[in-house]
Image (cartoon, helix red, strand yellow):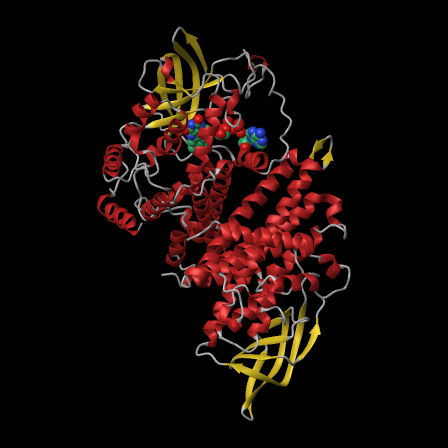
Amino acid sequence: MTGFREKVRAWLAANVPGDEELATAKRFQAALHDAGLAGITWPKEYGGQGLTAAEQQIFDQEAANYDLPTSVFRIGMGMCGPTILDLGTAAQKARHIPPLLRGEEIWCQLFSEPGAGSDVASLQTRAVRDGDSWVVNGQKVWTTVAHLADFGALLARTDPDVPKHQGLTMFLIDMHAPGVTVRPLTDMTGRAPFNEVYFADLRLPADAVLGQVGGGWAAAVTMLGHERVSIGGFVRKRHDPLAHANLAESARRYGRDRDPVVRVELAKLYAAERALTLFNARLRQEAEAGSPPGARGSVAKLAGAQLQQQAVAVAGLIAGPHATAWDPDDAAGDELALAINQTPSSSIAGGTDQIQRTIIGDRILGLPREPVADRDVPFRELRVGTQRPA
Amino acid sequence: MQLVLDDEQRQLRSAVRELLADHSDVRSVVDGGARYDRGLWRRMADLGLTGLVVPEELGGAGAGHADRCVVLEELGRALAAVPFLASAVLAADVLTALGDTEVLPALAAGEKIGAVALSGVTATERDGGWVLDGCAPFVLSGDVAEVFVVHTPAGWFVTAEGRRRALTTLDPTRGQAKLEFSATPARRLEHADPGAVLERVRDLAAVALAAEQAGGIAQVLDTIVGYAKVRVQFGRAIGSYQAVKHACAELYSTSERAGSLLRYAAWAADHDPDALPLAAATAQAFTGPAYFQAAATGLQLHGGIGYTWEHDAHLYYKRAKSSELLFGTPGEQWARLADRLDRVP
Ligand SMILES: Cc1cc2nc3c(=O)[nH]c(=O)nc-3n(C[C@H](O)[C@H](O)[C@H](O)COP(=O)(O)OP(=O)(O)OC[C@H]3O[C@@H](n4cnc5c(N)ncnc54)[C@H](O)[C@@H]3O)c2cc1C
């Protein structure tokens, strides 16, 4: 194990690049794979390393000292890849997993629609069977990295005559195929990391189905489980201005490190950060011992979002007016502002805080579900989002 | 680091849980006027739990702190009214650190109850011996202890004498006393660095208390979730209302995170003494207020029944508030953590 740690440490020290350009990111991911450090716990036959959560943890610990340029691969590595490994055919795994691991192909997740966010199962994008293939029409929204993606995991309605959860199917789609249009969507930070995606008579082969026809909801639940673990287990980047260590450093810089209020709030932030880190480590140890986290990933997701808000509060306490205005060449000012402005997304993306609490209550604590109006009604007859059915 | 229980610890947990289910009688103390649950304490002694981490050569079971935390979590869950924290944690840890062979075996065997006074007392050498003077204001289980372990600027002392005045306590399940010494003879416990012993004992106590508190949170959660499934209002189980469900979900998140901090601190107590001070301060600072918040929420979600004497919700509420303040107020705990963070390179 120490051998593995030394290898990771030495390799990262020699290979982490300084920027996040797409070409750099792809080169880095390929090099990571060549070094035997990509897909650490993934099966060997599809290009993974076949190692254990313990090695993954060592890698994560060492990687936390760097800013790896790998965020563009996060949806593929954290969500689509694991779901394909769970549900895909041997051919799908062989086709998609190796290039995904090498960073040659970027993935996006096409679930949310204007009328279907928290209530994903009410989505309206249709996939209609035509002989052996499927024809897709509809619209997705807030699709992260769709503008860079080569493939996407698409959730579409294949049967509107059954209740909403039963009529869905998941497809693996080529984002460069005719019939797919991607339009960037600017977020509140002023950047455009996500998109609207339109499908106009997109034609899919039969083998694009992931899992079962009509089994899209189960596939989505599988992927959302991976998503929560992936988002919740996300390790802070070293230079993240909202990390406790960096906030403590800026408290020293601004001469606020003796202020008792700042000290207490920093201590609280540290404890919350440690609690989440250790909780995630515990989930990994439990998974290693044979009990997968399941819905407990929602705890990490929820606590992570709350931690982010707590950190923004402490950042404001420390920076004071420096958080409100800064010299145009002051990169630190830009970074803090970006961190503050990105924070709301952590409580929305990947399922809102409210939805995570409901998942914890229903699936972990076994509390009775809320009565719902639409569970047994054919989708065709439902009112969806803010619209009425056609 | 080990954050999940091993097989032996799981067995220990079920054994203690069973013991407490069958024999813990908190109400004998709360309603019956007993000072502590003697029957339970006797059984714990018989099982070797009172000397769990005391080395075998000093009469104990030689187990680890992580094991003791398993026991403490169960005691916290059951609100057991035994002087474990005072005797099997504080006193046992001091005496173990000092290598005492005179009274420790009796403490470890549960034949005697120990209590520790950390402040307010001075020691003077007189006629080749030592005497204690002063007043220790809040001595945990000092009302039932037979042996007092006393920290003074001149080091550590042990005595069976001294005047005690049992205090009225917020938490009816755990006694406290005021101890007064006036030229009271005491035996000095030699140690090269009594200050280091004090620090380590405080850290271990912080972890032990956090274990009790984490157990308390878990129990509060289980109780309220069970109730929310069966209590019906407006034609639905209250657990199906989001306001209730989401509060339970937050409790679960708190419980899991407190448990994680605890497991790490307990592991550090056994395996990484350098990491212990920060880990202990983190666990205690987080878990103290978290338990009170949990207990208050649990009580609230029980509605009127939660406010009645017969219901145990108030016992958790009182235990949680008392424990939150026992080793320093939350403000002091956070400040302590902040100081420890200053020392991190
Ligand atoms: C940065 C970012 C990236 C994203 N990336 C992707 C992506 O890559 N792929 C993708 O498919 N989607 C993506 N999304 C979409 C995201 O999953 C949805 O925005 C999210 O699930 C919430 O759905 P909504 O926006 O429709 O809000 P709504 O569901 O309309 O919710 C509005 C409010 O109502 C609350 N609410 C809704 N239902 C309930 C309920 N049952 N109980 C209590 N409260 C409720 C919500 O919590 C919220 O506060 C992304 C979003 C963001 C912000």
Is there any visible trace of residue A177 in the rendered image? yes
Residue at left offset 60%, top offset 59%: B324
Residue B151, image quadrant: bottom right
Q: Position of residue A87 (x, y in %)?
A: 41, 25
Is there any visible trace of residue B289 in the rendered image? no
Left-right relation of A167 to B132? left
Left-right relation of B306 to A217? right
Left-right relation of A303 to B242? left
Q: Position of residue B337 (x, y in %)?
A: 48, 60
Q: Is residue B319 above or below residue A82?
A: below
Q: Is residue A274 above or below residue A134?
A: below
Q: Residue furthest bottom?
A: B127
Residue at left offset 30%, top offset 25%: A94
Q: Is residue B309 above or below residue A174?
A: below
Q: Position of residue A323 (x, y in %)?
A: 41, 47
Residue at left offset 42%, top offset 60%: B271
Residue at left offset 57%, top offset 64%: B328
Q: How many marks?
A: 0
* Quarter of the C terminus of chain A within the rendering: top right
Left-right relation of B160 to A131? right
Q: Is residue A286 above or below residue B177?
A: above
Residue A337, image quadrant: top left
Q: Residue furthest top?
A: A131
B179 or A345, which is in the foreground?
B179
